[in-house]
Amino acid sequence: MDLINQTALQTARLIREKSATSREVTQAYLDRIQLTDAAIGSFVNVDAESALAIADSVDQQILRGQTLSPLAGVPIALKDNLCTTSGVTSCASKILSNFRSPYDATVVTKLRDASLVVVGKTNMDEFAMGSSTENSSFFTTKNPWNFEMAPGGSSGGSAACVAAQQAPLSLGSDTGGSIRQPASLCGICGFKPTYGRVSRYGLVAFASSLDQIGPFANNCEDLAALLQIIAGHDARDSTSIPSSVPNFSSEIQEPIKDLRIGILPELINSDNIESSTRENLLAAIDVFKANGAKIIEVALPYAKYGIPTYYVIACSEASSNLSRYSGVHYGYRSTDRSNRDSADALVDMICNSRSEGFGAEVKRRIMLGTYALSAGYYDAYYLKALQLRRLIGNDFATAFNSVDIILGPTTPSVAFKLGAKSTDPISLYLEDLFTVGANLAGLPALSIPSGFTKDGLPTAIQMQGAAMQDSLVLQCGHWFQKWIGYQPTWPKL
Ligand code: GLN
């Protein structure tokens, strides 16, 4: 049996029904990683020994007849900004390259309780700042569909590993698009839950009011099953939503009735969208129409301010969050002692540790954020951005009075060449044009494949819903995949 050509839920079923062991499945994925990862570079660390030990214990629990979670025994990869007590949590930064977390992130504890098998940690843009994974201070991850292309980012490793069948599931984080954009460029499914749905405890903070952890998978049923495991209130995250978690897996199976799909004609017709992305989006709209959905034009007038608003807020929060990396408490400390005997030795040590430990993009954002927050500029930049954030949120709220879902493209372009945007930060920031709105407004948003370009690169559609409508968004994604008879296609590796 081909163990890696299964969905995550099918794999779990095979394991539960004893048609395969979790060890066999885990070994099959580890072999695949061994075979393919030198070329792709999804992983910063693979822990085969600990993965096989978890797999064995799941197999024993099954032999003992224990009832396990719907994804028990299934391998999963974690973005390396999720704290794990085993191994290093590096955020792909030199400053944390030896950091060992004293605690597990809440999502990691939940995965363990649900008997998933963590196979390793994935590459990312340093501190999740970027859209191509080229800002990793370790190495660049390649897009499995074409090794000359970027996998997107910042969760590029988590997206590439699912696209390359190195793991059927992974977790990423999304501050401005970092789950949806790489899912789109790698031809897989990625979901950013409503802000507060999933605990951020143990997610290394980038921009705390925007960050949210979410799943990657090959289809929406697997996404819902994984979200089921990681969602829920957590007293350790003060922004976590104190309400019960719906049964996503069963709710997405409910037939869809009277669906109202919102579209943004101005956006669909703009020159900002690559042509196959547009064609495949129009085809997707037709699929919804053919299945009884009403298509309604909506407007988000303030969306055009999304990118500047996002970058002012994200950089401001980052400049504050990243002040903890001083070489004193965490990670890398400069060994430069040239000024050892001076009264300024401590300041020099902190300065050298930060100068040597952070990469260029992280420094750029700390400086931009510090500037936006400084006296005299605070009102002009940070406060203005907060006001726009509210107006952008209001736009969505108005739109969701008349529609259930807003359907559009995930990204303006398909996968781009590695290096093509790395010298021009603004062109890379524009990758987030369609994704930052959901973060600023705290909304659930899904990216799923919509087809391919003539050159064989994946295109995607995005579905955004009102806050707490995670089930509805996933349900629309699931039914879309059902209607088109979606079967994942795999890159030839
Ligand atoms: N690409 C965006 C940025 O660079 C989003 C990153 C993210 O969502 N972590 O900030």
Image (cartoon, rainbow, N blue to C red):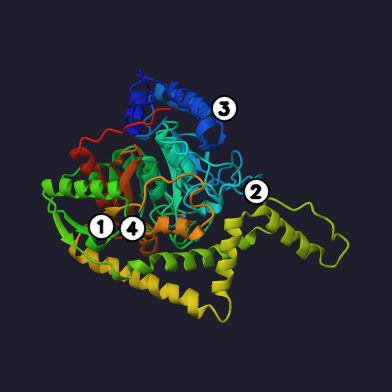
Q: CA distance from mark 3 to mark 4?
A: 47 Å
**Mark 3 is on which residue type?**
Glu
The nearer-to-camera label among 3 and 4 is 4
The nearer-to-camera label among 3 and 2 is 2
Could you tell me if residue 327 is visible in this image?
no
**Mark 1 is on which residue type?**
Ile
In what element is the residue under mark 1? helix
Residue receiving disc 3 = 49
**Circle 1/circle 3 CB separation < 8 Å:** no
Q: Residue at x 45, y 31 (%)?
A: 166
User: Which labelled disc corresponds to residue 272?
Assistant: 4
Which quadrant of the rendered structure holds the C terminus? top left
The nearer-to-camera label among 4 and 2 is 4
In what element is the residue under mark 2? helix
Q: CA distance from mark 4 to mark 2?
A: 35 Å
In what element is the residue under mark 4? loop
**Mark 2 is on which residue type?**
Lys
User: Which labelled disc corresponds to residue 94?
Assistant: 2
Q: CA distance from mark 3 to mark 2?
A: 25 Å
Earlier residue among tags 3 and 4: 3
